[in-house]
Image (tube, rainbow, N blue to C red):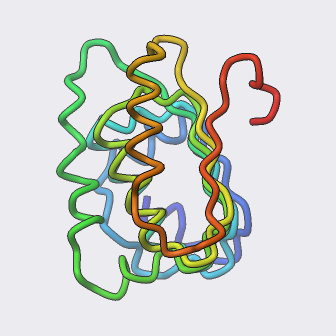
């Protein structure tokens, strides 16, 4: 992953599909890249299993290495054979680290999109971190996965709307299946 981004320092938009994500996740993924991606404003991660530790580390690395990130879109995927507790340690590193790289990693974030939410702790932790540390955040769009039942989805949304916010303008928008074209 480090070698791939060494020559992409001027990249402004990054779209990572499932295959590239697995390629990045297969190697040694640092907490932060040696050279920051100052120009990177938009990151789209497609088919990421947030509770798979190796893929969560890719997300954390991209977040901490992109100080001017404005738009983060995550299309979640699931792995029925994988316990959903595996990635909690990786995101906890991001949430609990008390250093400059994490304190400022969402300073420019304006929009966060999560598609196919499963209602797990990893997603809640990511949303809590974004709301608490992104002073310019305007909107969070959340769309539930088809397998998320309405009761669990309602509880998830209730938790998210109660989180402390760094931005007074931050809206949380929950998109049901009939509103899918918004995302």
Q: Where is residue 122 in the image (x, y as percent from the top left)?
A: 32, 43
Q: Which residue is drawn at 32% across and 33% down?
A: 120
Q: Position of residue 149 (x, y in %)?
A: 44, 13
Question: Where does the N terminus fall, quadrant-wise?
Answer: bottom left
Q: Which residue is drawn at 65% across and 43% down?
A: 173
Q: Nearer the viewer, residue 67 or 54?
A: 67
Q: In this view, does 26 lie to the left or right of 146?
A: left
* Callout count: 0
Q: In this view, does 123 lie to the left or right of 169?
A: left
Q: Is residue 127 left or right of residue 81?
A: right
Q: Where is residue 39 in the image (x, y as percent from the top left)?
A: 68, 78
Q: Residue at x 60, y 31 (%)?
A: 143
Q: Which residue is drawn at 33% across and 51% down?
A: 125
Question: In the picture, residue 31 is in which quadrant?
Answer: bottom left
Question: In the picture, residue 93 is in which quadrant?
Answer: bottom left
Question: Where does the C terminus fall, quadrant-wise?
Answer: top right
Q: Farthest residue in the bottom direction?
A: 100
Q: Position of residue 128 (x, y in %)?
A: 39, 57
Indicate whether 80 appears above or below 110: above
Indicate whether 5 appears above or below 75: below
Q: Nearer the viewer, residue 151 or 50?
A: 151
Q: In this view, does 38 lie to the left or right of 86?
A: right
Q: Farthest residue in the right direction?
A: 181
Indicate whether 178 appears above or below 45: above
């Amino acid at each position: 992953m480090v070698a791939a981004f060494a020559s992409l320092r001027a990249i402004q938009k990054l779209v990572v599909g499932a295959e590239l994500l697995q390629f990045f996740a297969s190697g040694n993924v640092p907490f932060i890249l040696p050279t920051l991606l100052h120009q990177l404003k938009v990151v789209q991660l497609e088919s990421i299993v947030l509770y798979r530790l190796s893929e969560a580390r890719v997300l954390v690395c991209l977040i901490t290495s992109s100080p001017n990130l404005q738009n983060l879109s995550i299309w979640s995927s699931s792995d029925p054979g994988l316990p959903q507790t595996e990635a909690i340690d990786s995101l906890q590193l991001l949430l609990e680290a008390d250093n400059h790289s994490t304190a400022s990693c969402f300073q420019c974030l304006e929009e966060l999109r999560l598609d196919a939410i499963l209602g797990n702790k990893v997603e809640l932790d990511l949303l809590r971190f974004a709301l608490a540390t992104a002073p310019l955040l305007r909107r969070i769009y959340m769309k539930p996965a088809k397998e998320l039942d309405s009761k669990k989805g309602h509880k998830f949304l209730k938790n998210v709307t109660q989180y402390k916010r760094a931005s007074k303008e931050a809206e949380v928008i929950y998109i049901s299946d009939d509103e899918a074209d918004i995302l």
